């Protein structure tokens, strides 16, 4: 291509982008996705939690449609985020674990919005596992934060205790495969029994936390690019309340471990009617064995809520910047998390399961000029790509597995059925499993263990597995058949 052809092509592309940024003669709305990591759906004031300190999320929820039965498509970071960005379920992607990336041939929301003339940015964690940008034109991530920290990165290495790609050290696991962990022998041991500490106050100054960095750089993005005349698509993604459970001191001061209550379902799981993996995890939490002690469990719960409060405080800085920059009325905002956290429900911790605490996610969607409301319809996060492009009038480059949730945003209390909600985990492993939610019923299929059936209206804590009971055989069989017709694990 000669210089004249290149300049002509570039000019045409610029005109196409400028035209694409207009919708019916009007500028398209900005789109901001804010993500947390491991945020349990119920842990928010707006969802009725009296312990959570989430004033900024509650303020956002007051102007949003709040979905009470939203689910991730895979309860672990990388596969979940891949599905969220592409609108594809895990069995249509290569990302099956926190060490497997997905191919660049799958368009993401960034590609859709770029083509429509948006300027796309990603600030924070997205756990791509490799060096692909997946369409984002502007990107700051863990490695930029570590560069900002300089020698203070030692503090983070100590807090993690060992290599942990899920927490950004390394961000790309392959970087350390040839030469092994460069921090080995250079961390300060803290006496933890497993890989993840129960929790304590962080040694970082508050302004040095990853959340502060993400909030600060997101505000900078809004100041630099929010008023250029070109709409933006920005994903801001925090790590907290995910481990390390080491918040800044002022947030830890809000939650005394001795005041924390263990979940109502703690110690009540019927191990005779649960899959062996679940029973094993209840009996022994490998990452944090100390959680067998109720006092240590209460400490973890306090640290989790403190992490959440700190993330909420940083979210507030971004929401305030939108208002101060007069962008609030021009910006669609979506808040969600890649998965939840069991936080002691049934005696379980972390994610990886299809129980409500783990697979359920908070979901708030605020559209300027649209009424707020509460939607109880079960929906999947895999639908966010279809939904946000639809709201912005942006054409997707390829079909996906989701459905636009705009009808439920327009009428949150509508009895319209969004269709079955699916989730899957451990594909291509020795114990794949999948879930279907239809109405009040949730069924989990384990390839090499007993199934699980729960009536979430009668048993919201999922204490009574109905699979295997004669009177529920037909319902379990029906849902199992629908699930296996959807994905037979290869």
Image (cartoon, rainbow, N blue to C red):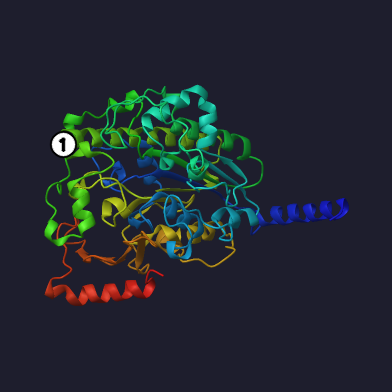
Left or right of residue 435: residue 464 = left
Using the image as rendered, state which of residue 338 and residue 364 is in the foreground.
338
- For the question of whether residue 351 can be seen, the reply is yes
In this picture, is 444 found above or below 228?
below
Residue at the limit of the structure toward the front, as seen here:
179
Image quadrant occupied by the N terminus: bottom right
Q: Residue at x 50, y 61 (%)?
A: 386
> Which residue is denoted by mark 1 in the rendering?
293
Please give the count of numbered marks on the rendered protein.
1
Q: Position of residue 335 (x, y in %)?
A: 42, 47
Q: Position of residue 346 (x, y in %)?
A: 18, 50
Image quadrant occupied by the C terminus: bottom left
Using the image as rendered, state which of residue 333 and residue 281 is in the foreground.
281
Q: Position of residue 459 (x, y in %)?
A: 17, 59
Using the image as rendered, state which of residue 444 and residue 175 is in the foreground.
175
What element does badge 1 sit on? loop
Q: Position of residue 46 (x, y in %)?
A: 31, 44
Q: Residue at x 22, y 32 (%)?
A: 299
Dot 1, how many residues are within 10 Å of its Cα: few (below 14), some (14-19), or many (20+)? few
Using the image as rendered, state which of residue 362 and residue 91 is in the foreground.
91
- For the question of whether residue 22 can be seen, the reply is no
Q: Residue at x 59, y 62 (%)?
A: 395
Left or right of residue 254: residue 313 = right
In this picture, is 397 found above or below 290?
below
Q: Residue at x 15, y 70 (%)?
A: 468
């Amino acid at each position: 291509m000669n210089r004249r052809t290149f300049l002509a092509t570039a000019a045409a592309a610029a005109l196409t982008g400028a035209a694409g940024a207009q919708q019916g003669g009007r500028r398209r709305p900005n789109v901001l996705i804010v993500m947390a990591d491991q945020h349990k759906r119920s842990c928010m004031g707006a969802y009725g939690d009296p312990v959570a300190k989430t004033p900024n999320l509650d303020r956002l929820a007051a102007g949003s449609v709040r979905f009470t039965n939203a689910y991730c498509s895979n309860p672990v970071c990388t596969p979940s985020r891949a599905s969220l960005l592409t609108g594809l379920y895990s069995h249509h992607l290569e990302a099956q674990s926190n060490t497997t990336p997905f191919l660049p041939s799958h368009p993401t929301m960034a590609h859709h919005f770029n083509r429509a003339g948006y300027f796309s940015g990603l600030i924070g964690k997205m756990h791509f596992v490799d060096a692909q940008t997946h369409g984002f034109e502007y990107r700051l991530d863990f490695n930029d934060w570590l560069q900002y920290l300089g020698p203070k990165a030692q503090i983070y290495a100590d807090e993690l205790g060992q290599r942990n790609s899920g927490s950004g050290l390394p961000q790309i696991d392959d970087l350390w495969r040839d030469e092994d962990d460069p921090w080995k022998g250079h961390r300060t041991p803290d006496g933890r029994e497993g890989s993840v500490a129960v929790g304590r106050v962080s040694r970082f100054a508050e302004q040095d936390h990853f959340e502060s960095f993400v909030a600060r750089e997101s505000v900078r993005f809004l100041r630099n690019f929010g008023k250029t005349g070109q709409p933006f698509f920005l994903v801001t993604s925090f790590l907290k309340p995910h481990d390390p459970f080491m918040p800044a001191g002022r947030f830890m001061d809000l939650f005394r471990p001795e005041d924390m209550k263990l979940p109502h379902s703690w110690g009540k799981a019927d191990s005779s009617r649960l899959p062996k993996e679940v029973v094993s995890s209840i009996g022994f939490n490998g990452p944090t064995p100390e959680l067998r002690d109720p006092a240590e469990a209460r400490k973890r719960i306090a640290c989790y809520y403190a992490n959440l409060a700190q993330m909420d405080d940083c979210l507030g800085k971004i929401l305030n910047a939108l208002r101060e920059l007069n962008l609030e009325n021009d910006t669609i905002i979506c808040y969600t998390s890649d998965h939840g956290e069991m936080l002691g429900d049934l005696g379980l911790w972390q994610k990886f399961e299809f129980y409500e605490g783990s697979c359920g996610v908070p979901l708030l969607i605020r559209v300027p000029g649209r009424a707020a409301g509460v939607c109880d319809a079960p929906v999947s996060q895999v639908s966010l790509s279809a939904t946000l492009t639809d709201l912005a009038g942006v054409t997707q480059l390829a079909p996906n597995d989701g459905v636009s949730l705009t009808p439920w945003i327009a009428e949150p209390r509508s009895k319209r059925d969004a269709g079955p909600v699916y989730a899957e985990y451990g594909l291509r492993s020795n114990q794949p499993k999948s879930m279907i939610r239809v109405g009040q019923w949730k069924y989990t299929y384990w390839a090499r263990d007993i199934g699980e059936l729960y009536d979430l209206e009668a048993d919201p804590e999922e204490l009574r597995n109905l699979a295997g009971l004669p009177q529920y055989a037909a319902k379990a069989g029906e849902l199992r058949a629908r699930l296996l017709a959807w994905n037979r694990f290869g």
